[in-house]
Amino acid sequence: MSATVLGIADDRALGSSLRVVVTRPGSLLAAKAAVDEVVAAIDAAASRFRPDSELSLLNARPDQVIKVTPLLAQAIAAALRGAELTAGAVDPTVGSAVRLSGYEADFSSVAPRGAALPLVAERIPGWRAVRLSESARTVVIPRGVELDLGATGKAFAADLAAAAAATAISRGGVLVSMGGDIAVAGDPPKGGWLIQASEDSAAALSDAEETISITGGGVATSGTTVRKWTRGGEVLHHIIDPVTGLPAKSCWRTVTVAAGTCVDANIASTAAIVMGAPAVAWLERQSLPSRLVDENGSVHRVAGWPDPAGRATRSS
Ligand code: AMP
Ligand code: MG
C-alpha cells in the first residue's frame, strides 16, 4: 500500500503555530499564499496585541459609533453569535478580565511566574452591551468594555483561510491549523483528515494518542493546561468565567469538539470549559462530537466522538 503524499507548510501566525496541509503537494505554495493573505488581514483587524489593529482602535474609542471593515464586522458577529449560542459562557467582553488575570501580551511574553495579582471577582460587562449593525457595519462599545476575540478569532481565521486556499488551488483539499484550531475545505484525502486529539497542539504525532477523521468543517481544542501562569503561588489560565471575571474553575482541563465549522467547534470547546459538568448534556443537545478530559485526566466522549476501543460512544 502506498502512503498518501501530502504537502505541509509550517509557520507561525496570530501568536500560534500555523500549519497548512494540501492533498496535492504541487498546490502547497498557492494554498499557503492564500492562507497568509487571510491571516494577515485577520491580524490587522482583530489582534488585541497590536496597538494599531482595528480592534485596538475600536477598544480605545468607547461610546462612539465606529465604522469597521467587513472582516472585523464578521469577526465580531461570530463572537456575538457564540455568546448567544452558549447563553454567554463564551463572551467577547472578557477583554479586561483576561488582561487583569495576567494575560496582557502575546502569550510568549507572559512571564510564567510573578507576584500575586489583586484579583477581584466581578461579572464581565456582557455581550449584550455591544451594539453591532452588520448592515451599516458600525459598532458601539460602551466605556469599560474591552472586546477580546481570542476564542473565535483563530477559528474564524482557520475557516476563512481554508476556504480561500481551496478556491486558490481549485483541485484537491486543504487543512489549516491555527494553533490546533483546524478547518478543512475541498476534497478530503481518502479516509478523511485524521486529526490527533492532544491536550497540547504542539504534541508530536503518536500512536498512543486518539484521532478523529473529518471530511469537512473543523475541530477545535480549548484547555487550561497550556496557556497558564503562576502569580503569587496561584495557577491562573486564559479561559475566563464570565460570572466571576476570573480564570474558570472547571472540572475539564481540555475539551476537543468537531463541528460544521471551526468557529462552531471553538465556541463549543471554550464554552464547555466554562460550563463545567453541564457541558456534557449541552454538547449532546447540539450533536457536537466531543472529547472532554477531566481534571484527573479521565477522558469522556460524547455525541458520537469515536471510542478508540471500538465500543459505541455512550450518550450521557
Ligand atoms: P480558546 O483557546 O479558543 O478556548 O480561546 C480562549 C481565548 O479566548 C483566551 O485566550 C481569551 O483571549 C479569550 N477568552 C477567555 N475566556 C473567554 C470566554 N469566556 N469567552 C470568550 N472568550 C474568552
Ligand atoms: Mg481555541
Image: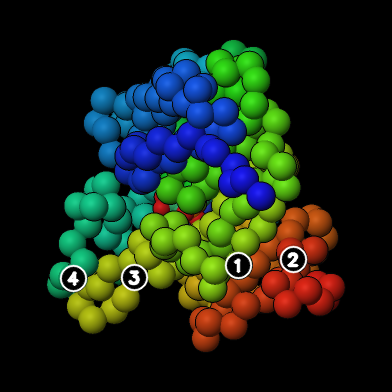
- Measuring 67% from the left and 76% from the top, which residue is drawn there? 300
Q: Which residue is mark 2?
A: 306
SS of the residue at dot 2?
loop
Do we see residue 267 in this rendering? Answer: no
- List x then y, in percent, for residue 111: 18, 62
Distance in Å between CA atoms under marks 1 and 3: 28 Å
Relative vertical location of residue 34 with respect to residue 302 in this rendering, above or below: above
Relative vertical location of residue 27 with respect to residue 159 in this rendering, above or below: above
Seen from the viewer's position, the closer of residues 59 and 268 is 268
Mark 1 vs 2: CB contact within 8 A: yes
**Amino acid type, label 3:** Leu
SS of the residue at dot 4?
strand
- List x then y, in percent, for residue 10: 37, 39
- Measuring 74% from the left and 66% from the top, which residue is drawn there? 306
Seen from the viewer's position, the closer of residues 207 and 87 is 207
Q: Which residue is mark 3?
A: 236
For the residue carrying disc 4, how many other residues have a C-alpha within 10 Å: few (<14), some (14-19), or many (20+)?
some
Mark 1 vs 3: CB contact within 8 A: no
Residue 278 as seen in the image, left or right of residue 47: right
Q: Is mark 2 within 8 Å of ligand 2?
A: no
Tell which circle, 1 or 2, labels the residue nearer the N-terminal end.
1
For the residue carrying disc 1, how many other residues have a C-alpha within 10 Å: few (<14), some (14-19), or many (20+)?
some
